[in-house]
Amino acid sequence: MERRINPASVRMLTARDLAEVVGNLGLAYRLFNTQGFPTIRLGKRVLVREESLYAWLRANEGQRVDVTPAQ
């Protein structure tokens, strides 16, 4: 059976959207380049699924996260 995804249920966040959550655009860009952060790269666009962002936040809650961009 083919699994169908409801496009309305999948919210993709840009860096500007993420900045609204974390409070800073610079931090949002650094997070997008942090190893282990759940980004999706579509051409030049870098996005994160809202669901993946909240799962990542829950998994890292109470920890210090190094937002130095991965080399």
Image: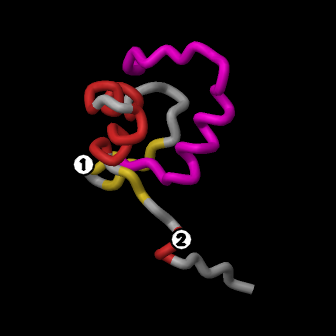
Q: Which residue is mark 1?
A: 44
- Identify which amino acid the numbered label 2 is placed on: Ser
Q: Position of residue 34 (x, y in %)?
A: 44, 26
Q: Secondary structure at mark 1?
A: loop
Tag count: 2
Q: Which residue is mark 2?
A: 9
Kindly identify the residue that appears in the image at 41 percent across and 33 percent down: 22
Q: Secondary structure at mark 2?
A: helix
Name the residue nearer the viewer: 69 or 11: 11
Q: Taking 55 as reference, is 61 above or below it? A: above
Badge 2 local density, few (<14 within 10 Å), some, or many (20+)? few
Kindly identify the residue that appears in the image at 34 percent across and 55 percent down: 42
Kindly identify the residue that appears in the image at 27 percent across and 32 percent down: 25
Snapshot quadrant of residue 54: top right
Q: Position of residue 48 (x, y in %)?
A: 44, 48
Name the residue nearer the viewer: 55 or 36: 55
Query: Rounded to the nearest whole Å, what is the CA distance between mark 1 and mark 2?
Result: 23 Å
Please identify the quadrant where the N terminus is shown.
Answer: bottom right
Snapshot quadrant of residue 12: bottom left
Residues marked 1 and 2 touching at CB (< 8 Å): no
Please identify the quadrant where the C terminus is shown.
Answer: top left
Q: Taking 28 as reference, is 53 above or below it? A: below
Magenta region: which residues? 47-71
Kindly identify the residue that appears in the image at 40 percent across and 15 percent down: 68
Q: Is residue 51 magenta?
A: yes
